[in-house]
Image (cartoon, grey):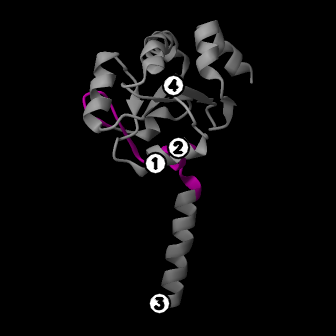
């Protein structure tokens, strides 16, 4: 009986994992905003997602972030959202950077091990770095920083066609 119960539990676990969205698989269960409020990662379901790796201490990041804020605000109603993955030295710096630059998007919690895993998954070797995933989690641009800088909102239209 115990073996049967264990087998049923294992099967149910596999079924639950299979039903977990790519968003939860990639990011976990929650994000935070600039005020520290928690949000469910499921809020991104059905959206194209830009994953932004950046830090307050980085001059190129500080130059690009206002452009990305403007881009995101112009595209937010187009089922597009940014997720911030901080490369800052601590949570206080991350939160200050989000507030200072008026990031309205969500971020990986600073203490989340997923933050560092994402850097590995996307082979981040320098910042700022912006990668764009389609609504199903497939990478559609690893050159998104340049595309946003050079093409503005036309970049979103280009990504939709891919």
Q: Position of residue 94 (x, y in %)?
A: 32, 31
The tag earlier along the polypeptide, 4 or 3, is 3
Give the magenta range: 18-38
In the picture of the structure, the residue carrying the numbered disc 2 is 118
Side (left or right) of 20 relative to 39: right
Which residue is pictured at 33% across the width and 16% down the height? 102
Element on which disc 1 rests: helix
Q: Position of residue 153 (x, y in %)?
A: 59, 9
Label 2 environment density (alpha carbons within 10 Å; few <14, some 14–19, many ≥20): some
The tag earlier along the polypeptide, 3 or 1, is 3
Element on which disc 2 rests: helix
Q: Which mark is residue 128?
A: 4
Camera-near label (2 vs 4) is: 4
Which residue is pictured at 56% across the width and 32% down the height? 46
Element on which disc 3 rests: helix
In the picture of the structure, the residue carrying the numbered disc 3 is 2
Confirm or deny contact between disc 2 and disc 1 (CB under 8 A): yes
Camera-near label (3 vs 1) is: 1
């Amino acid at each position: 009986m115990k073996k049967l119960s264990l087998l049923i539990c294992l099967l149910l676990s596999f079924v639950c994992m299979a039903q977990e969205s790519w968003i939860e698989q990639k990011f976990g269960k929650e994000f935070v905003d600039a005020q520290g409020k928690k949000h469910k990662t499921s809020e991104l379901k059905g959206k194209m997602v830009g994953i932004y790796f950046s830090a307050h201490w980085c001059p190129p990041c500080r130059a690009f972030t206002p452009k990305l804020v403007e881009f995101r605000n112009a595209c937010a109603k187009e089922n597009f959202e940014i997720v911030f993955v901080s490369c800052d030295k601590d949570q206080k710096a991350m939160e200050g950077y989000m507030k200072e630059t008026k990031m309205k998007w969500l971020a990986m919690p600073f203490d989340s091990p997923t933050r560092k895993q994402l850097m590995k998954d996307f082979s981040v070797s320098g910042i700022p770095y912006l990668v764009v995933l389609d609504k199903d989690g497939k990478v559609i641009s690893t050159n998104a920083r340049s595309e946003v800088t050079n093409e503005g909102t036309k970049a979103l239209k280009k990504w939709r066609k891919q």
